[in-house]
Image (spheres, grey):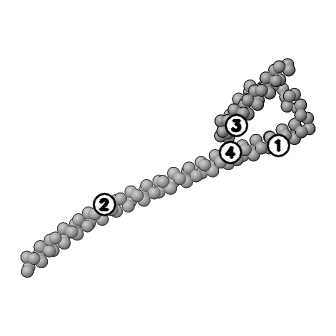
Amino acid sequence: EKAKLEAKSGELTSDISVADSKIGELAGAIATGETDLKNAALIREKEAADFAEGEKELVDGVKTLGHAIGVLEKEMAKNPAALAQVDTTQADKTLQALSVVLDAASFAGTDKRKLQSLLQAQQEIADDDA
């Protein structure tokens, strides 16, 4: 009977050692997971801040463009030929500046091409008139 109990005690001691080892492994995995979670949260916070900043810039750009369109529409309503009277000597610089603005505002490629075509057509008309 004593030998049987000693054998059982040895078996249970072995089980305890295995369980302790497993607990150590799991504790390490939990610590790694918590560190990864903290890092991911920091990355997400930074990305959210970057997104909010970019979104604010785009919204401001859209508002500015909307205001500019409104001003142009008002002026065109007053004098439809006003756009034809625009000084086109600086048109290339204007096209480059608009290209930068459009790129920054992430306009769709087709919208960007339409606007550039309109400006280039206006420049060609002005060049023909000169």
Q: Residues within 10 Å of mark 4 (few under 14, many from 20)?
A: some
According to the image, label 1 marks what residue?
A: 70
Q: Position of residue 77 (x, y in %)?
A: 89, 39
Contact, CB < 8 Å: mark 3 with mark 4?
A: no
Q: Is residue 121 left or right of residue 30?
A: right
For disc 3, the marked residue is 111
Which marked residue is nearer to the observer: mark 4 or mark 1? 1
Real-space Cα separation, disc 4 to disc 2, in angstroms: 49 Å
State which quadrant residue 16 falls in.
Answer: bottom left
Which residue appears at 33% of the width and 62% of the height? Answer: 26
Residue 41 place in picture, x, y as percent: 50, 56
Tag 2: amino acid: Glu
Q: Which residue is drawn at 70% across and 47% down?
A: 59
Indicate the secondary structure of the residue bearing disc 1: helix
SS assignment at label 3: helix
Q: In which quarter of the image is residue 83?
A: top right
Q: Nearer the viewer, mark 3 or mark 1?
A: 3
Residue at (75, 46) in percent of width and height: 63
Nearer the observer, disc 3 or disc 4? 3
Of the residues under marks 4 and 1, which one precedes in the sequence?
Answer: 4
> In the rendered structure, which disc, 4 or 2, sits on the residue that comes first in sequence?
2
Relative height, residue 75 to residue 1 (above, below): above
Q: Which of marks 3 and 1 is nearer the N terminus?
A: 1
The residue labelled by disc 2 is: 25
